[in-house]
Structure formats: structure tokens, C-alpha cells
Image: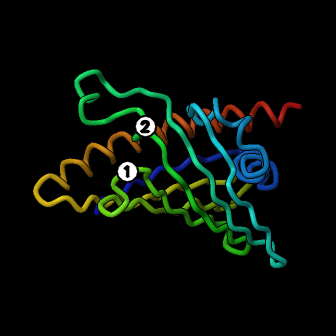
Amino acid sequence: MQKVVNSLKLNYPLDLVLQVTHFDLMRNMPSFTKLLGMEEIKLLRFDEHEDGSHDVEFTLKSKDRVPAFARTIIKPEMLVWRQVGKWDPETLTIDFKIVPHFFQRVIDIRGRKKYVEGAGCVTMEITSSISVGIPGIGRLVEQAIVSEVKKEQIKLLGKIEQEVKNRSQR
């Protein structure tokens, strides 16, 4: 199992950061398709609870950015997955699990997005654990996935920072 950890410090109030990076995303996923670099996002389930927590499930279809040499193994239809999450308003965390369309029994990706408030800013931390249970080559596949997830998260955090900045100026 390998971990990916990324964070972003935002010098904006918590309510704005949560609105842009969490609540608007949950309520209007199609509008975030471009921001997240996806071809398609569909909300499957959003269940709000009395305590302010909620359960969410959606599918994502990534744009086909697979290098030509890898297309014999990785087909475009393999770039679809479900993400299931649970929001806890007390700890300001959403725990999530990614369920790939293919290889569900060998690929385990789960993580946590956490918001930490302090000194006029909010730090958004994303931690993901990735495990690929394929004997022999699992570790190599994990490393490839970790590398890609890290790059994508860094790119996403930059876009999020810009979106929060834009919204703060409205």
C-alpha cells in the first residue's frame, strides 16, 4: 500500500472554501467537470442526514489521456470509476473510496479530504491510500497510479485555488 498526500493552504474564510470545494461540487457536479479535468461526472446519490453529515456517490469518466503505447492494455472504458464518500461536519472530513469499473477486486483506493482552519486560512489536505493486489507487478502498478494521482491532485489543487479566488472577488 502506498500513500499520496497533498495539501493546499487557502487564505480565505472556511465557509467560502467549503462552499466552493465541497458543497457546490456535491450539488452541481456537471459544472465541475472541466475544473476536475473529467469528461463526465454524474451524481448517483446524495443523502443528507439530520446531523449535517451526508453520503454521496457519483461516477467519473476521465478524459482519455492514456499514452499510445499503453492503449493495448488500458482501454478508454477503463477510465470510469465510482466514488463513494461520507461527510462528517464535526471533523470537517470526507472519507472516500474509489471503485474502479475494472479490476475492483485487486485495486483498493481510499482516502480522506480534511479541512483544517487556523489563523485566517484553511488548509485542505487530501490523503489517499492505494493498493494493487496483483502478485509480482502490483507494486509497479501502485507506483504508476501513485505518480498519476499525485500529478492530478496537484493540478486539481491549483484549479481549486483559482476557483476560490475567483469566487471571493464576486
Q: Is residue 53 above or below residue 40?
A: below
Position of residue 115 measured from the top left corner of the image (x, y, whole percent): 64, 60
In this image, 19 relative to 125: left or right?
Answer: right
When asked about the image quadrant of residue 109, the answer is: bottom left
Per the image, label 2 sits on a secondary structure element best described as: helix
Residue type at tag 1: Phe
Image quadrant occupied by the C terminus: top right
User: Residue 77 — which label?
Assistant: 2
User: Residue 117 — which label?
Assistant: none
Q: Is residue 153 above or below residue 44?
A: above
Position of residue 74 measured from the top left corner of the image (x, y, whole percent): 31, 36
Position of residue 105 measured from the top left corner of the image (x, y, whole percent): 33, 63
Image quadrant occupied by the N terminus: bottom left
Disc 1 designates what residue? 102
Q: CB of mark 1 within 8 Å of CB of mark 2?
A: yes
Q: Earlier in the sequence, mark 1 or mark 2?
A: 2
The residue at the point 35 percent across, 28 percent down is 66
Position of residue 107 measured from the top left corner of the image (x, y, whole percent): 33, 58
